[in-house]
Image (cartoon, rainbow, N blue to C red):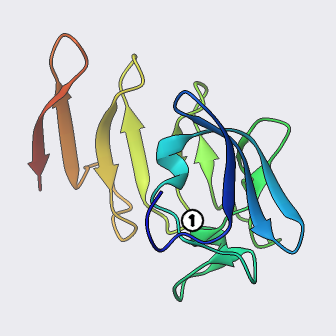
Amino acid sequence: MGSNTKGSFTALSGRKLDSIWGGANTRYEGSLPLRLVQNRQFDGASTTTIENCAASVCNPEINTADNRLKKDQVGGSSVDYDYDANGALIKDFNGQRFGYDAESHQKEFFSASNQTTTPDATYHNDGEGKRVKKIVG
């Protein structure tokens, strides 16, 4: 893990992280893909991420029933994180939206200020599903 990571990371199995100890006897459990946590900076003293960032963005709550970020992070009536039928994130806390093709490859990005159906960026994949092109605007 990175040199600015605090706390202990345990039970690495392949490319999955099975648990994270964040301090004060707080344990985050689940089979998390390693890429989800390797760029995170956990502050072991206060069990949160370092930096000035809202917890709903930098350290969001997880719904243990479906292993996704909780749709409502702040206790209001709005949906902060939303998913399509395949489980792909289609809206994040900041209001950015994402579109996917039939094989769950991201094909569109909409900034938070864009409330139209015209994406800010589109992505194109080759026959093997690898991204080969990005068009902005």
Identify the residue at image location x=40%, y=67%.
112
Q: Residue furthest right?
A: 25
Q: Which residue is mark 1?
A: 93
Identify the residue at image location x=51%, y=85%.
51
Identify the residue at image location x=53%, y=35%.
88
Q: Quadrant of residue 78?
A: bottom right
Which one is nearer the viewer's eye here, 19 or 63? Answer: 19
Query: Would you say 116 lies left or right of 118 here?
Result: right
Q: Quadrant of residue 26?
A: bottom right
Which one is nearer the viewer's eye here, 2 or 95? Answer: 2
Q: Quadrant of the C terminus?
A: bottom left
What's the amino acid at mark 1?
A: Phe
Can you say whether 50 is above or below 32 in the image? below
Can you say whether 121 is above or below 75 in the image? above
Q: Quadrant of residue 12?
A: top right
Can you say whether 114 is above or below 31 in the image? below
Q: Residue furthest bottom?
A: 52
**Residue 93 image position (x, y, % from top left):** 57, 65
Query: Would you say 120 lies left or right of 76 here?
Result: left
**Residue 100 image position (x, y, % from top left):** 38, 31
**Residue 72 image position (x, y, % from top left):** 75, 61
Can you say whether 135 is above or below 93 in the image? above
Which one is nearer the viewer's eye here, 68 or 81? Answer: 68
Identify the residue at image location x=21%, y=24%.
130
Residue 77 visible in the current orientation: no
Q: Secondary structure at mark 1?
A: loop
Q: Residues within 10 Å of mark 1 (few under 14, many from 20)?
A: some
Query: Would you say 136 lies left or right of 59 here?
Result: left
Which one is nearer the viewer's eye here, 100 or 7? Answer: 7
